Amino acid sequence: MRRLVVLGAGTAGTMVVNKLRSKLPRAEWSITIVDPATQHYYQPGFLFLPFGTYQPKDVVRPLRPTLNLTRGIELISAAVDKVDGAGRLVHLDNGAKLGYDYLIIATGTSPRPEETPGMSDGLGANVHEFFTYEGSMALAATLADFQGGRVVVHVTEMPIKCPVAPLEFAFLTDAYFRRRGIRDKVELSYVTPLPGAFTKPVSAKYLGDMLEQRRIALEPDFVVESIDAEAGTLTSFDEREIGFDLLVTIPVNMGADYVGRSGLGDELNYVPVDKHTLLSTTDDHIFAIGDATDAAASKAGSVAHFEADAFVPNFLAHVEGKPMPESFDGHANCFIESGDGKALLIDFNYDTEPLPGSYPLPVVGPMRLLKETRINHWGKLAFRWIYWNILLPGRRMPVPAHMSMTGKRRPPTTETTTDAVRIPPGM
């Protein structure tokens, strides 16, 4: 009996075990997934909780029913202490040990406010985040009571989960305060370590113009050194200072601590992998998928989905000693909520930046790329049903895993992404 152990029952881990269980004979393979959680969260929904678009029931479900446990997947409710790659053992925090023949690391990434001096001190008061369920719910209460002042939406550093989420929050905040009739009492700023609203030049221009149209001040190249919650100030390493009455920050994101303890990760605890196959660069019995990798793709649910489609045939070939047939191209497909019931759509990969056009079909669409439309907004809301009912169970979506240039058009003065701008990892 060959043993597959998957660490993490989030988006990537759940999709992978549900897909692989039907491909790996039960008489030959055991599949074990390890996660201490009892709930599964639809993380894209955290963006909507502060504005009342979603309620808790929309983003939280029990973990166990998301896994095909009746089909031979074992769930172990424990945290990982460390991985012994040489001995092919997973040490759990309860003292138990799990042997494996192949290991998939899918424990994602999480916000670490303690990495920035002063950030943790103000959390829950005038400093908030929405990358956790608890943080998003606390922010909902604060926004409801906010009557005016300086609101700063801030990104500490890249990479982060869903790199467009901070922009979405800024756009939705503008719309939220306009609906409440107090937008003129709010000074809204978007503060980022990037040189513009986004890293890719064409989309950066579109998104930067949208910030300007909404009177959202853009403060680029701001690398935060510290936060003084009591004084209400952000200070950068180049000694710029920005004041706030309410700070909505995206803390440093890092992979799981056990990855670092096990010597499997980089300085941010992300697993170095071949970006096309997701195989560890140091151990051919270990793969990583989703937000847990150092691959220079967006840390987003759509990426995990496209990765899983390419990963499954590769894994099946690799364990039989055959060449891996698929090559993941970094494909990401993200809706960007812009407020007032509209959204944009961006579609890109390692080599091609987001471009205008239509998706998935030329002219017909029905989705529009880099253009605000109501159809895009409804597509974003519809994705929640798709997530729970198609993606997590491991069913195939009728969307190619590889990005297509069909329907896209490149503005005549646009350079290629790699020539035009340096792309930080995770974007």
Image (cartoon, helix red, strand yellow):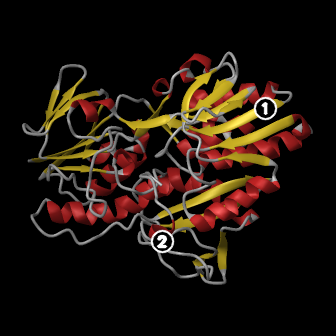
Instruction: Answer above or below: position of 270 versus 408.
Output: above
Element on which disc 1 rests: strand
- Residue that extends furthest to the front in the rendered view of this protein: 238
**Residue at the spot x=30%, y=61% of the render?**
311
Nearer to us in this view, 136 or 261:
261
Q: Of the residues tagged 2 and 1, which is closer to the observer?
A: 1
What percent of the width, then of the height, locates residue 161? 49, 45
> Within the image, what quadrant is residue 190 found in?
top right
Amino acid of disc 1: Arg
Query: Could you tell me the amino acid type at mark 2?
Result: Thr
How far across and how far down the image is residue 403, in percent?
46, 72
Residue 229 showing in the rendered view? yes
- Vertical side of 413 occupied by 188: above or below: above
**First in residue order: circle 2 vs circle 1:** 1
Q: Disc 1 designates what residue?
A: 150
Q: Position of residue 194 (x, y in %)?
A: 56, 50
> What is the secondary structure assignment of the residue under circle 2?
loop
For residue 227, the mark is none
In the foreground, 35 or 124: 124
Q: Quadrant of residue 359?
A: bottom right
Q: Residues within 10 Å of mark 2 (few under 14, many from 20)?
A: some
Disc 1 packing (10 Å; few <14; some 14–19; many ≥20): some
Identify the residue position indicated by label 2 in the image.
Answer: 352
Residue 200 is situated, as x and y percent measured from the top left of the image, at 55, 63
* Picture residue at 61% right of the left edge, 79% below the top: 413
Horizontal placement of 359 versus 175: left or right? Answer: left
Question: Can residue 398 be seen in this snapshot?
Answer: no
The residue shown at (41%, 55%) is 304
